[in-house]
Amino acid sequence: MPRDEIELQPVTHILVDAIGPPGKRVFYLQGWQDDRTVTLIVEKFQIQSLAIGLEQFLVEIEEKNPDLPQASVDYEEEKMHILPPIDPLFRVGELGLGYDADNDLLILIARELIAEDQDAEEASVVRFWCTRSQLRAMSSWGIEIASRGRPLCPQCREPMDPEGHFCPKKNGHNH
């Protein structure tokens, strides 16, 4: 049985954001319903994967339900930043998506990352019930903040730190 099982149905707002300098940023997923806020730690690649998966999922939903209004992708950047207090409930190990056609709501399921010796059923779970537009906006903003990271080396395409980088294509010479 999960330690924590939280349902925000529906969310008032949902976002992803990053705090810290490029290369040392911590990424967060935060949703709230009225005065209840849930903050989770996510990885950059999870945000990127979610954005890609969400777009594919929305295409499927719209193909099966052609009468649905188009989900908006618009967001106001000032409303997409994490709000204090930043007290993450857990680090996310797995994200999943679902759709409730009767209510036209998407569900974003975040499951806690657990140690190998723990029972998977003990992982905490948060379910964020969102409109298609809320998740599309969150996803678009997530791609934007993920792209604000360190520049990529033109030789090996790996991130470069401000003080330089060990490039395998340059035979180990700093770039």
Image (cartoon, helix red, strand yellow):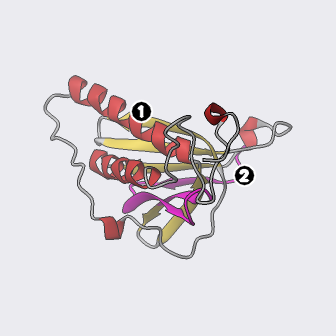
Give the residues in magenta: 1-30
Which one is closest to the eye, mark 1 or mark 2?
1
Report x, y in % for residue 79: 34, 68
| Quarter of the rendering containing residue 145 | bottom left
| Residue assigned mark 1 | 53
Amino acid type indicated by mark 2: Arg
- Residue drawn at point x = 45 percent, y = 64 percent: 32
Which quarter of the rendering shows the N terminus?
A: top right
Q: Secondary structure at mark 1?
A: helix
**Alpha-carbon distance for marks 1 and 2?**
28 Å
Q: Residue at x 27, y 64 (%)?
A: 76
Q: Position of residue 3 (x, y in %)?
A: 72, 52
Residue 111, above or below 18: above
Give the camera-side residue of 58 and 34: 58
- Crowding at label 2, few (<14), some or many (≥20) Cα neighbours within 10 Å? few
Give the percent coordinates (x, y) of residue 139. Answer: 38, 47
In front here: 145 or 61?
A: 145
In this picture, residue 128 sits left or right of residue 80: right
- Whether residue 12 is in magenta: the answer is yes
Please identify the quarter of the rendering in which residue 38 is found: bottom right
Q: Which residue is mark 2?
A: 3
Q: Secondary structure at mark 2?
A: loop
